[in-house]
Amino acid sequence: MNCSTCRYELSQCLDGRLPSGRRAIVMRHVETCAVCSAFWTDLQAAQNLTLRLGKMRVSEGFRERLWERIGAGEGTPAAVFHEPVPLLTKFRYAVTGAAAAAVVLLGVTWARGDRTVQRDPVVKPDRLGVQAAADIGVQGDQSPMIPMMSWARPLTCELVAVETAKQLEQRHAAVTAGIRKLNHDGFSPGAAGSDAAVQQILHDADEFCGLGGILLDLRDHERLYFTNSEVDADLRYAVSLLRRSQQDARNLETVRSLVARALNSGRLANVSRTITLVPSNPREEVDVLMRLITTRHDVFPKLFIVVGNIDEAFRDYDLSRNFFEMRDECGPVLVAPRSEVEAGGLRILRARLSGGQQPGYGVQILTGRPRQSATK
Amino acid sequence: MVSASQDYQPDPVTMVSYHRALAEHTDSLKAYATRLLGDSIAAEDVAQDAFLALYRHLNQVPAAAFRPWLFRVARNLCLDQLRRRKFKLCLFRDLQKDDDNPFVPADTGSARPDQLAETREANHAIEVAIGELPMKFREAFLLCEVEGLSYEDAAAVMGCPVKTVSTRLFRARQRFTSLVSRLIKV
């Protein structure tokens, strides 16, 4: 028999709670084990000591006082409800209730996934999109560490869809304008201007194809749908033709035979008006966005400028309206919609920054202009 | 208030049980509360409040359950006091310790003064050892070992399974034995 089991059962044995058969086994062990035998002796001696403990008596007037209280109605159920509650107790109950409500509210907020505080604040310097920021003058290697960005709103599929649709329409307008100009001016084989125009059209068409792919991905993941099914069909047709054009020779023939046919539909000029977004929970959003960033890593930087680390200046100058927090495999990072940056929507912030405590801070990012011209 | 007291009349048979409980359990209830609180005056108040609560619920508590019920109420009142005490300064705590210690040795009739002093010293050592047990173990020890409640009644008082009472009692005994080992060897 195990000694520790034996000791536990000896304690029960002392209270007479062990069945006789079991008691015999325990006692046999006690006879053979010196340690358990000593424990058993000590246990009995300790019990004798407690039995010798002195009695404790209530004071003489105990019963009289009790009957007085009962006689005064203190012991009646009705009186219980009339007992005065001290002001301090009332205050304590109120504070406890308020604290409990606050805890519940915090818990509910947390459970709903509104957790903008991120666990991994580290951003690798070679991450996706830093090159894109560098294109417009942001130094990607300025500081690779990004602080907790609890103030920034998370990047959502909705934002991605809206930004994609905006840019898609811009590319559509650029391609159709380019083709119209080409038809109007006529194409001169070998002329530098004509070749450049064709290459520009093909470049815009490639971008249209990438952006259209993102919208169709979101459509396939049921994050959005088109109110006009013909837009859906037109976009699919355009994207498939433009993918074929990427395989073909980069010349006028391809523009006429594939690009012009692909973007012929006028409905593609107003895609953003036909998009309806499907609400989803934040976890699904993160999954879809992660998949999108991974599979469309060539197109994503065209939509959003990855800002990198610009410290607390954003918080100090209340820039949270224009920046969003994106998560990828490297952790959280700030991004700004390219359309807003390029349209100068953030330019007003430049003045505020320039006039603030840190003049010129982050101007390149906010204006989207080359660093040399923007830095003061 | 008086009219309310007149309205509430427990039936006579129950009142007989109540009187008997008052005669039998008052001292042990006070002793239990004293050892939990370490304060005999507060313990007496707790015992009185427990009997008052029993009077309030006389028609709901069966006479056979008076004892565990009273201990349960006393335990809750003690825990309330201990919780409240955390936030209060315990002034004059040392002064009241010995003055209000109304322990009476079990049999003092024929004892010599030196024997009495020895018994008093042993009692003090035992009380100190009990006071050093952690609250959970102390509860089990006081209820089962000192007051002689069954495991089932102790479980009802402590609001835990019987097996837990058994385990806590075993642990309490282990600690208590080592704490009073000096007295045992003598």
Image (cartoon, rainbow, N blue to C red):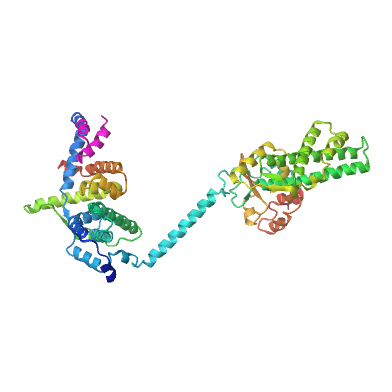
Which residue shows up at 25% across the image and 48% down it?
B153
Q: Nearer the viewer, residue A368 or B111?
A: B111
Residue extending farthest left: B110
In the rendered image, the vertical position of residue B106 relative to residue A67, given as above or below: above
Which residue shows up at 43% across the image and 59% down it?
A96
Whether A217 is among the magenta residues is no
Position of residue B41 in the picture relative to residue A332 (left or right): left
Q: Nearer the viewer, residue A345 or A89?
A: A89
Q: How many marks?
A: 0
Which residue shows up at 52% across the image and 51% down it?
A108
Whether A15 is among the magenta residues is yes
Residue B39 placement (x, y as % from top left): 25, 58
Q: Nearer the viewer, residue B27 or A124?
A: B27
Residue B89 placement (x, y as % from top left): 33, 61
The quadrant holding residue B31 is bottom left
Q: Assign the magenta stretch its main secondary structure.
A: helix
* Quadrant where the N terminus of chain A is found in the figure: top left
Which residue shows up at 89% across the image and 44% down it?
A181
Position of residue A290 in the picture relative to residue A132 (left or right): left
Asked if residue A172 shows in the view, the reply is yes
| First to last magenta residue range | A1-26
Asked if residue A170 shows in the view, the reply is no
The quadrant holding residue A26 is top left
Residue A11 placement (x, y as % from top left): 23, 39
Residue A83 placement (x, y as % from top left): 33, 67
The quadrant holding residue B1 is bottom left
